[in-house]
Amino acid sequence: MLEKDYIDKIQSFLENKNYKVYREVIPDECKNWEQPYRVDMIFYREDVGWYGVEGKVANTYRSGSKVYNAIQQIKKYRNLHYSGKIINNWCFLFGSNHYEEDMLKFEEQGIKIFLRYFLLKYKIFFMEYCEYKNKNYNHISICPYTKQSRRIE
């Protein structure tokens, strides 16, 4: 699965849940740059607020550099303005080619748990799209099993 395809799927899901979704957003401070920063996605709903998202797809356990790159990108983005606003909620969107109900390997679950708490040290939320064969159960988890937990169904 390509990163763009994965983020397209997330965008569609969020729009179906009445969120406003913006893709490849250039921060106000970078609009005149030759190669401006581009945030993968920003989403908003009145009752939830604004979230910025940097997405990565990983299909191997040797994807540490993708996590590092996402953290570095979010650190650059977080203090910039987007249509005059600073976004306080930033997420690392993690994607893989697995279905949740297929009982992911214990090691993969352990990596996700590690990432949830590791990213919180940088004030970044772990986000994933939980896709089931029965589409009625699909949802997005943001920072599951933590005080900051949010579930979009």
Image (spheres, rainbow, N blue to C red):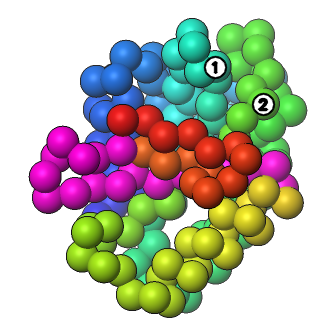
- Residue 20's label in the rendered image is none
Please, is residue 150 above or below residue 113 in the view? above
Percent position (x, y) of residue 7? 39, 45
Label 1, label 2: how far apart the Cα atoms are: 9 Å
Asked whether, in this view, residue 142 is left or right of residue 1, the answer is: right
Percent position (x, y) of residue 82? 70, 19
Q: In terms of image quadrants, where is residue 14?
A: top left
User: In the depicted view, which residue is nearer to us: 11 or 23?
Assistant: 11
Give, as a three-letter code, the residue at label 2: Asn
What residue is rendered at 42% in x and 45% in y? Answer: 140
* Quarter of the image that includes the C terminus: top left
What residue is rendered at 43% in x and 19% in y? Answer: 19
Asked whether, in this view, residue 82 is left or right of residue 48, the answer is: right
Asked whether, in this view, residue 127 is left or right of residue 5, the answer is: right
Q: Is residue 12 magenta?
A: no
Mark 2 secondary-structure assignment:
loop
Q: Residue furthest left?
A: 134
Please, is residue 116 above or below residue 143 in the view? below
Other-residue count near label 2 (Cα within 10 Å), few / some / many at <14 / 14–19 / ≥20: few
Asked whether, in this view, residue 109 is left or right of residue 71, the answer is: left
Percent position (x, y) of residue 122? 84, 56
User: In the depicted view, which residue is nearer to us: 143 or 122?
Assistant: 143
Please report the bounds of the magenta region as a residue range.
122-139
